[in-house]
Amino acid sequence: GENVEQHPSTLSVQEGDSAVIKCTYSDSASNYFPWYKQELGKGPQLIIDIRSNVGEKKDQRIAVTLNKTAKHFSLHITETQPEDSAVYFCAASGAGANNLFFGTGTRLTVIP
Amino acid sequence: EAQVTQNPRYLITVTGKKLTVTCSQNMNHEYMSWYRQDPGLGLRQIYYSMNVEVTDKGDVPEGYKVSRKEKRNFPLILESPSPNQTSLYFCASLGPLPGQGIYGYTFGSGTRLTVV
């Protein structure tokens, strides 16, 4: 099956700086790559996703890039704010987006 | 409010005592799933259901059962819980996210299960 690796496991940045989280996947058939944000005591929440027919997608301060040749994708958060502090998960799946294979998570801390 | 509701939030039980974690969604999604979250392992799929009366195993189904008698409910059953099933469990449904214009998973708030 699919194997998703995520780095780093923890990340601390100063407020206003950028944060980058990287993931690699193993199954070249995967074509759906969502990112989830999990706040303390809550379930993961979808924040952005990208499909394999697109190389980059942006939504305000959040962007995701995908390199299908290298089988890696990244989450970029610009102008970080304290409320961005959370655990972020990347995931990969096939076209139906049914069975998501998750990375192990990145705990992001934004220091005011 | 569109949501996935699971209960209970916290549960401590003893080895071998059958338990059920309930899950309900109000978005009319056909696809529902259960995940467990363990430190350093991310989320792993236990079981999923593509529609009423259609269920199948995920990546870590051993020791679990599910049922899907109606579209909105997808309970997780542990017939004889063991300590290695101590974990944080999430129910999720897959479909259009109301008001967001995207298609993806909506997760419940989680059930922290401890088996002693």
Image: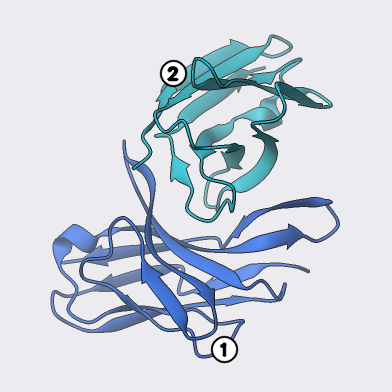
Local packing at callout 1 (Cα closer than 10 Å; few below 14, some 14-19, many 20+) is few
In the visual, does B35 lie left or right of A73?
Answer: left
Give, as a three-letter code, the residue at label 2.
Pro
Q: Position of residue B17 (x, y in %)?
A: 19, 83
Same chain check for tags 2 and 1? no
Q: Is residue A46 above or below residue A72?
A: below
In the visual, does B77 lie left or right of A70?
Answer: left
Colouring rule applied to residues: by chain
Specify the farthest residue to the bottom.
B69
Q: Position of residue A3 (x, y in %)?
A: 36, 34
Numbered label attached to residue B70: 1
Q: Quadrant of residue A85?
A: top right
Q: Chain of mark 1?
A: B
Q: Is residue B112 above or below residue A36?
A: below
Q: In the depicted view, which residue is nearer to us: A49 or B76?
A: A49
- Give the residue pinned by disc 2: A8
Residue drawn at x 74%, y 15% is: A78
Q: Quadrant of residue A2?
A: top left
Secondary-structure class at tag 1: loop
